[in-house]
Image: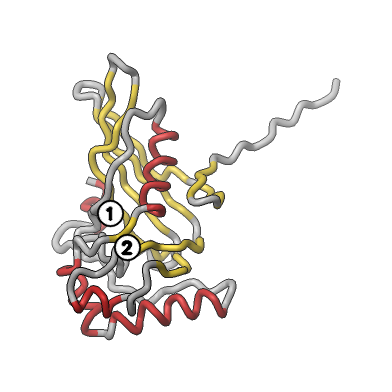
């Protein structure tokens, strides 16, 4: 009898025309309140990040008047909190966090992007009325990469400003274009003392 070999199916996320493999790290659902929390890991990738035109001198200088930057991202971990509507049988995001992740040191890193706060909350719209958690993840990732960053969390970039954040952004793009396999690593660690970082990030 011929042995049937099942093909391994890998879930994918499509964002801005690119395919990105997804890996669900944690997922919990509260049946009493119809709410859930899912942590997803995305592999290193390259993306074009869009910026709104600066409304202050600092914001304009920040991107040298550029409306987009082509950047290479390290491993990313995201957390999506969501609610489930049993009447419509749909899922809608209520919370969205994003961090860079150093897999070797198992440390979360604060992305130096102006729509991400120090506690890793992302200031962006959220996915609504999805038919499954998988669809919710796909839509939320797509929303993040296609959104236009408007400097909502500019006050959280003080550490990067001290390290000449403007030049850092431009050098980040330059390295991305010049070195195809380059992965950035010099970011500030997320350290929500006294709570363990993963518990705080996922909670």
Toward which corner of the image does residue 153 lie, by quadrant? bottom left
Toward which corner of the image does residue 179 lie, by quadrant? bottom right
- For residue 97, side relative to residue 9 (left or right): left
* Farthest-out residue, top: 87
Mark number, residue 48 = none
Q: Going 51% across and 61% down the picture, which residue do you hit?
A: 45
Q: Which quadrant of the figure contains the N terminus? A: top right
Q: Going 24% across and 24% down the picture, which residue do you hit?
A: 34
Q: Going 24% across and 51% down the picture, which residue do you hit?
A: 199
Residue toward you, 36 or 107: 36
Residue toward you, 13 or 152: 152
- 76 w.r.t. 28: above or below: below
N-term mark: 2 or 1: 2
| Secondary-structure class at tag 1 | helix
- List x then y, in percent, for residue 117: 21, 61
Q: How many marks?
A: 2
| Secondary-structure class at tag 2 | strand
- List x then y, in percent, for residue 190: 25, 65
Is the residue under label 1 in contact with that under label 2 (CB below 8 Å)? yes
- 59 w.r.t. 131: above or below: below
Q: Which quadrant of the figure contains the C terminus? A: top left
Q: Which residue is mark 1?
A: 198
Residue toward you, 98 or 173: 173
- 174 w.r.t. 102: above or below: below
Alpha-carbon neighbours of circle 2 within 10 Å: few (<14), some, or many (≥20)?
many
Q: Which residue is mark 2?
A: 108
- List x then y, in percent, for residue 122: 26, 54
């Amino acid at each position: 009898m011929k042995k049937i070999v099942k093909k391994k199916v890998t879930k994918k996320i499509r964002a801005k025309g690119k395919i990105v493999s997804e890996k669900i790290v944690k997922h919990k659902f509260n049946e009493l309140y119809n709410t859930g929390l899912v942590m997803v890991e995305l592999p290193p990738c390259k993306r074009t990040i869009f910026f709104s035109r600066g409304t202050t001198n600092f914001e304009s200088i920040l991107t040298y008047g550029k409306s987009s930057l082509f950047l290479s991202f390290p491993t990313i971990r995201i957390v999506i909190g969501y609610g489930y509507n049993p009447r419509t049988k749909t899922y809608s995001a209520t919370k969205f966090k994003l961090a860079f992740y150093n897999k070797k040191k198992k440390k979360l890193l604060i992305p130096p992007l102006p729509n991400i706060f120090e506690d890793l909350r992302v200031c962006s719209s959220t996915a609504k009325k999805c038919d499954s958690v998988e669809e919710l993840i796909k839509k939320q990732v797509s929303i993040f990469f296609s959104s236009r960053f408007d400097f909502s969390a500019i006050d959280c970039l003080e550490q990067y400003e001290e390290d000449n954040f403007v030049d850092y952004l431009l050098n980040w793009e330059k390295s991305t274009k010049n070195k195809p396999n380059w992965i950035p690593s010099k970011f500030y660690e997320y350290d929500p003392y006294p709570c363990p970082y993963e518990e705080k990030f996922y909670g």
